[in-house]
Amino acid sequence: MAEKLRDLSQPIDVTLLDATVAAFYGTGSKEERSAADQILRDLQNNPDMWLQVVHILQNSQNLNTKFFALQVLESVIKYRWNALPVEQRDGIKNYISDVIVQLSSNEVTFRQERLYVNKLNIILVQVLKHEWPARWSSFVPDLVAAAKSSETICENCMAILKLLSEEIFDFSRGEMTQQKIKELKSSLNSEFRLIHELCLYVLSATQRPQLIRATLATLHAFLSWIPIGFIFESPLLETLLKFFPMAAYQNLTLQCLTEVAALQFGDFYNVQYVKMYTFFMIQLQAILPPEKIPDAYANGSTEEQAFIQNLALFFTSFFKNHMRILETTQENSAALLMGLEYLIGISYVDDTEVFKVCLDYWNVFVLELFEAHNEMEPAAAVSMMGLQTRMVPGMVDGTVTAVHQRRQLYSASLSKLRMLMICRMAKPEEVLIVEDENGNIVRETMKDNDVLVQYKIMRETLIYLSHLDHEDTEQQMLKKLSKQLNGEDWSWNNLNTLCWAIGSISGSMVEEQENRFLVMVIRDLLNLCEITKGKDNKAVIASNIMYVVGQYPRFLRAHWKFLKTVVNKLFEFMHEMHPGVQDMACDTFLKIVQKCKRKFVTQQVGENEPFVSELLSNLATTIADLEPHQIHTFYESVGHMIQAESDNTKRDEYLKRLMSLPNQKWAEIIGQASQSIDILKNQDVIRSVLNILQTNTSVASSLGPHFFPQISLIFLDMLTVYSELVSSTIAEGGPFASRTSFVKLLRSVKRETLKLIETFVDKAEDLPHLGKQFVPPMMDPVLGDYARNVPDARESEVLSLFATIINKYKGEMLEDVPRIFEAVFQCTLEMITKNFEDYPEHRLKFFSLLRAIGTHCFQALIQLSSQQLKLVIDSINWAFRHTERNIAETGLSLLLEILKNFEASGFQNQFYKTYFLTIEQEIFAVLTDTFHKPGFKLHVLVLQHLFYVVDSLTEPLWDSSSVPYQYTDNATFVRDYTIKLLGTSFPNMTVAEVTKFVDGLLSSKLDLPSFKNHIRDFLVQSKEFSAQDNKDLYAEEAAAQRERERQRMLAIPGLIAPSELQDEMTGNGLVSFAAGEVPGTAVGSSAAVLAWMC
């Protein structure tokens, strides 16, 4: 049966093919489906299978079989169309057109075969992308003529036109060359008059709902790009507004109006836009009043919910592009404010996607108002706040007045918008205590990235709103908080969103106002905690108090007594056993210490000693109820405090006191181990060792080079435990020892030892001589142990440790590289080159080590033997063949650095003669592989370097014995070699196309943007990237845009939260006030809050 189907020398047995397809989709045995799958794959891969397509379509009764045949045909059209003879291309084109007309002529067959017709339409559009306009110039007139012959044909013609528009304007990037896209867009533009006339004729003449819907859907696809005269200088808008009140067409009409609203062509059509908007608003108010929107969505059908979502899209598009023209008259302004009222109502709809649409616009809207307000500062903004100042020379009074009038116009809407942001504020990353689906308060187990992105946008929007009116922002927050206190508005969600909003605006107010505001907030929250009953309720309030105080480091730095009381309150929370409270207390403590660390090592007025000393005296009691991972966070926090102490003697004393508990335990274990090694076979002892090492790592990460006295104390004992005791236990246990739970625990000790050393070396960059002295003693215990161990017992952290050491000490490690190379290179390569899956951690860290050597100790690579250098280059090629993005990018970056280093080394001729062609071939292989698209930027840079360096090489790259004739220069040889390489790899491309591409590479090698675009077009032509997501080809441009956005945010107070800034703020925030007092009204309030907290 299978052989009969595979024999394509005669017409295929369609009945047998139907049975095979049915078996594949059927419910038979696994073996039957597998056999059918293999047959169908073989047929698909047969280059002559497409010749059977017409025979199959004419004789098959199975829709799935027809789809299979069309899939084969679609593949030929996409990848081999230009290689087919003209007669065969015309035959396919005419057959597909005839079948579509035949099926869509009759109402009954058109409805029954709708899926089949849709697939045929897609095939036709694929043909058009090749044939139109050059070889099928009459397509649009033919289609319009056919549409007028029958309503069902017309309906299908609309579907074809819609598909064509989408293929050219929406999905063309990365699918077609830039020249082809330009050509198709131009053709569609020039012939749109016929399509426009057809659409208007249909909408005025037909009563058939399906045809009206198809026409509206087609218009929707075209409206974003057609010449604007077709919209405003024809009856099109009036026709659309006529259909809007009709329930059956509301959504499609609204989508069309949204496309019109999104257009922007200067001021020429402003009058028409105003008429459209005002007429639309009259109709809308009759359909749906604004105050009923959230209920209408909650209780509505799918269509009704889609209408509200489309309404959000319409308003946001119109306001983004045409809001200003509605501000000119009172009547228009009223319609504008009503539209904003609708959008605020829609923003309360309980649907994430709808809210995202609204939020995106609100962010743009308030940013525009804020920027106008900000541009007037300092003089104009100060004047608006009622303060006297001299006007800046050249400032036009009218500008200030206009900005002020706009803010006045929108003041009521902005106030409602502030309340919306407060009520719907998303959860920040720092909050760990959440309500689960059963209504219980639990610790969060997984971060929701969508929520974090939403929080970022909402926070930004609320900061702009706060800058526009600090008083209203403050009053709304305090009013909502008072409703929590009196029980009128009490709920976990309401309190959470309010506190998240309060935390989000940190840094946006002037300091005195912020002080007053925060004192009132904390006072009310503590009051609420006292009067509220129930452990869950108190946990929620505690979580919010911790979050809010953690967001305001400037306030804490300026109020020592308040800061001390907050920290002591956190210590209380560290004894609270409710899920998540201890974690959040430790995290908040760390966050506060990072921003206020100097305060803890300075002896404050009224204190007998610095706070850090007091803390160390009570250390055991404070951490008594914490889990190990929480203790590590706590120790890291205290490390930050100690790091801020500038007196070396005091700092070392604090470190000694901090580490006294773990050091006592460590000395006890090492002492017992020196008496009997068997003590290290006790799992509880090993867990204690692991915990001690993790505590040391936490302190090293925050203390940096000042951790030296502590690591010196335990270093040699640590290496002894690492090499002799742990490794011997693994070796004695046989081949399966590494899988036992005890050995896994022992390996955790080894990994933590390496991590501790790496952390110290990494952080000790200010004093490199400190870290360098630890390298020689590690050579045998660590490197020797790695080389001697069985693969499963080799720790990948050894590789990352030595990568860190080389990155830190650079050329000073040159003499050690041969030893490192000898110990880890060969044995690691054997582990990772058997496949792309085993030992994933070793892969990335191995190539990171290799990159460190290539970057900082390049001389060591030159001194390798030719066999060893070949091993290095082969391993780099292996790296960038990985589909694991990190490994591939590390390999490509390393390759680029080595190529540049060899170019300047004096050995470039020998190197490139050996490896140029291999590297070029490997790079082209990954460049044209869809799995490696994320590496596009680096692929391009490597290729550009190769084509650039060719001209500087003085020795021939070719082997004289293997080429038919001698080349005049390397550039000519590389050109011919590349043409042959690509011509062989892509038989679907003609020699002329490949030659044009290679010549383009050589001519644009000095212009990176042109070089890159040339390669993008080639990837489209080669068809390797068709029907794929091509965003990675444009990733570099996206990254540049993200950096510009960050620089913009840094310029606006509060947009990057004070708690997220790298260093402690300078200026007012670091002034020490006597006895914690600050000027103004905050003193009395602060004292009141302290009383509450104490």
Image (tube, rainbow, N blue to C red):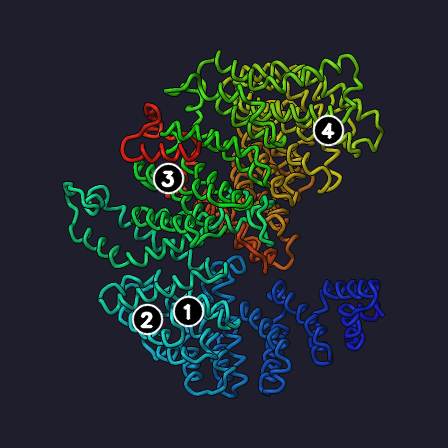
In terms of secondary structure, where does tag 4 sit? helix
Circle 1 is placed at which residue position?
A: 292
Check disc 4 and report the residue beneath it: 747
Foreground tag (4 vs 1): 1
Q: Earlier in the sequence, mark 3 or mark 2?
A: 2
The type of residue carrying mark 4 is: Arg
Q: CA distance from mark 3 to mark 2?
A: 44 Å
Q: Are marks 4 and 1 in contact (CB under 8 Å)?
A: no
Residue visible at 23% across and 53% down?
403
Q: Residue at x 79, y 17 (%)?
A: 677
Crowd around label 1: few <14 · some 14–19 · many ≥20 (10 Å):
few
Q: Quadrant of the C terminus?
A: top left
Residue 338, position as x, y percentages in the image: 32, 67
Q: Give the CA separation, mark 4 to mark 3.
A: 49 Å
Q: Looking at the image, is 812 positioned above or below residue 480?
A: above
Q: Which residue is mark 2?
A: 277
> From the viewer's perspective, is the residue at label 3 or at label 2 nearer?
3
